Amino acid sequence: MEKRELLYTGKAKSVYATDNADQVVILYRNDTSALDGKRIEQLDRKGMVNNKFNAFIMDKLAAAGIPVHHEKLLSDTESLVKRLDMIPVECVVRNFAAGSLVRRLGVEEGLALNPPTFELFLKNDALGDPMVNEYHVRSFGWATDEQLNRMKVLSFQVNDVLSKLFDAGNMLLVDFKLEFGTFHGEIMLGDEFSPDGCRLWDKDTRKKLDKDRFRQNLGNVVEAYEEVGQRLGITFD
Ligand code: UDP
């Protein structure tokens, strides 16, 4: 496999072509953004931590039968993945109220949601990733009914697998965001799963161990990500 030209630069990752049209290389950078990219800072080691964290989680999901784009780690900060045609919506599953749900509905942070909720957001920084519903997704042609249903089923499967995994490390999986794409017509989980795109709290103290540490200026952001990794048995060095 040969790494070729830069295809796309996102807020925290860069995507490179390879000599195989079906594969791309993802480079995890130290950039950390909030407020739809309006605030960006460099956090030492974060690219490496998220790359290895994501590889560990994607392998667990694949072992549970969930189709994922991840293929293998290439280096501390690079992974080889299948090249997907991305669906421009974010799928968010919530087990406890936090973040935008608290702001939108005025409920208390930490309220348990039974059953867990499923929400969709359009990927559009200029519009601030507005919430959309299933009709918008279908009517604007972002995904078909069948693709949408598959994304929903897979999102709840991911929730089942990962809620148990984090529970074993004495953590609550509060909420998380997934992005899907198609690979030769099949819906597959793309993007990344790391503490940048989910909320994790210590079960006893409810200490925040995710990107809210950056959003809320709580400090020790990457240290918290590494603590989550250590609780799951991931080694970073
Ligand atoms: N999230 C994300 N990218 C986004 C928006 C949200 O990864 O562009 C994640 C976020 O980290 C959280 C979940 O999706 O785990 C739900 O986020 P929420 O809607 O509460 O928005 P926020 O409060 O983060 O703006």
Image (cartoon, rainbow, N blue to C red):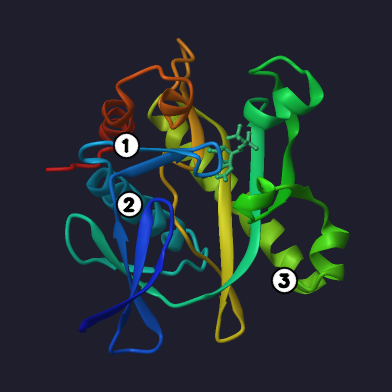
Q: Quadrant of residue 71?
A: bottom left
Depth check, front residue: 189 or 88: 88
Give the residue pinned by disc 3.
147
Residue extending furthest top?
205
Depth check, front residue: 185 or 137: 137
Depth check, front residue: 156 or 102: 102
* Amino acid type for the residue under numbered disc 3: Gln
- Mark carried by residue 197: none
Q: In the picture provided, is 111 more to the left or to the right than 133?
A: left
Give the residue pinned by disc 1.
232
Q: State which tag comes first along the sequence, 3 or 2.
A: 2
Residue 163 higher or lower than 64, as above or below: above
Counting from the top left corner in percent of width and height, residue 225 is at 32, 33
Counting from the top left corner in percent of width and height, residue 125 is at 60, 51
| Ligand 1 falls in quadrant | top right
Q: CA distance from mark 3 to mark 2?
A: 26 Å
Give the residue pinned by disc 2.
56
Disc nearest the viewer among 3 and 1: 3
At a point 28% along the width and 45% down the height, the residue shown is 30
Question: Do the residues bearing badges 2 and 1 touch, measured as CB atoms within 8 Å?
Answer: yes
Q: CA distance from mark 2 to mark 1?
A: 9 Å
Q: CA distance from mark 3 to mark 1?
A: 32 Å
At a point 30% along the width and 22% down the height, the residue shown is 220
Residue 218 higher or lower than 51, as above or below: above
* Amino acid type for the residue under numbered disc 1: Leu
